[in-house]
Amino acid sequence: MAVSEELLEILVCPKCKGRIRLNEKKDGLECRACQLLYEIKEDIPIMLIDEAKPL
C-alpha cells in the first residue's frame, strides 16, 4: 500500500510549511524550497527535519 493521495494533499514540509510532492521513485517526499527529501519507510513518511536528506 502506497501513501494515499488524500494524505499527500494535506502534508507540508515541517521546515518551511511549503508544499511537498512525491518523488519519481515514489520512495520519498520532496520539498523543492528546502531542497530536502523525506523518505517513506513501510508506507509511512518520515517527516522529521533531522532525518531528511538533501536533494
Image (spheres, rainbow, N blue to C red):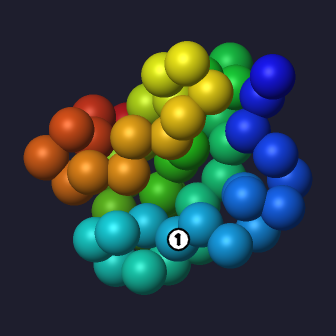
Q: Give the residue pinned by disc 1.
A: 12
Name, please, the residue furthest toward the left: 50
In percent of width and height, residue 12 lies at 52, 71
Quadrant, the N terminus: top right
Name, please, the residue furthest toward the bottom: 17
Q: Secondary structure at mark 1?
A: loop
Name, please, the residue furthest toward the right: 5
Q: Is residue 28 above or below residue 25?
A: below
Mark 1 Cα shell of 10 Å, populated few (<14), some (14-19), many (≥20):
some
In percent of width and height, residue 18 lies at 50, 78
Q: Quadrant of residue 9?
A: bottom right
Residue at x-position 68% and y-position 73%: 10
Q: Determine whether, in the image, residue 28 is placed left or right of residue 21.
A: left
Q: Amino acid at mark 1?
A: Val
Task: Pick whichever, 55 or 26, lies toward us.
Answer: 26
Question: Is there any visible trace of residue 24 in the rendered image?
Answer: no
Question: Is there any visible trace of residue 41 in the rendered image?
Answer: yes
Residue at x-position 52% and y-position 47%: 30
Quadrant, the C terminus: top left
In percent of width and height, residue 8 lies at 72, 58
Q: Is residue 28 above or below residue 49?
A: above
Q: Is residue 31 above or below residue 29?
A: below
Q: How many marks?
A: 1
Q: Determine whether, in the image, residue 30 is placed left or right of residue 54.
A: right
In percent of width and height, residue 34 lies at 34, 62
Residue at x-position 65% and y-position 35%: 23
Residue at x-position 22% and y-position 54%: 49
Task: Pick whichever, 47 or 36, lies toward us.
Answer: 47
Task: Pick whichever, 26 or 45, lies toward us.
Answer: 45
